[in-house]
């Protein structure tokens, strides 16, 4: 395998690494915010959690909500994380379809 093929494979994996890293980060931040809530420490702003959920596809946020039992009563978190999750799936579907048909 030449350098060009190696770079192409690496570039193809970047979106997967991006999603994995952001969702692990969001999951960890949800856990940290729950810890801070229990200990009455300074919290992570809700806006930060929602923005990170929107750009990451929301899966880490949904997992964090369930695992840490955190923000589960707030409809805005469900709405943003689910919309991001299904929106990102739709975008990837359309992108893959466009690349295959082109």
Image (spheres, rainbow, N blue to C red):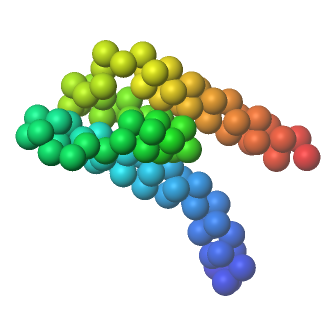
The residue at 51%/27% (across/down) is 80
Q: Quadrant of residue 61?
A: top left
* Residue 9 in the image: above or below residue 55: below
* Residue 10 in the image: above or below residue 54: below
Taking 102 as reference, is 11 left or right? left
Q: Position of residue 101 (x, y in %)?
A: 88, 41
Image quarter hosting the N terminus: bottom right
In this orientation, does residue 2 appear?
A: yes
Q: Nearer the viewer, residue 1 or 92?
A: 92
The residue at 50%/49% (across/down) is 19
Taking 93 as reference, is 85 left or right? left
The residue at 43%/55% (across/down) is 21
Q: Nearer the viewer, residue 34 or 60?
A: 34
Q: Quadrant of residue 75?
A: top left
The residue at 54%/38% (across/down) is 54
In this orientation, does residue 35 appear?
A: no
Taking 44 as reference, is 4 left or right? right
Q: Nearer the viewer, residue 82 or 96?
A: 82
Q: Position of residue 71 (x, y in %)?
A: 30, 25
Q: Position of residue 45 (x, y in %)?
A: 36, 42
């Amino acid at each position: 395998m030449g350098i060009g093929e190696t770079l192409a494979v690496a570039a193809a994996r970047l979106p997967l690494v991006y999603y994995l890293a952001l969702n692990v980060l969001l999951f960890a931040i949800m856990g940290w915010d729950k810890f801070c809530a229990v200990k009455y420490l300074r919290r992570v702003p809700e806006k930060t959690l929602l923005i990170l959920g929107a750009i990451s596809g929301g899966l880490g946020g949904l997992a964090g909500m369930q695992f840490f039992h955190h923000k589960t009563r707030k409809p805005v978190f469900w709405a943003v994380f689910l919309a991001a999750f299904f929106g990102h799936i739709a975008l990837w579907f359309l992108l893959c379809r466009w690349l295959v048909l082109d």
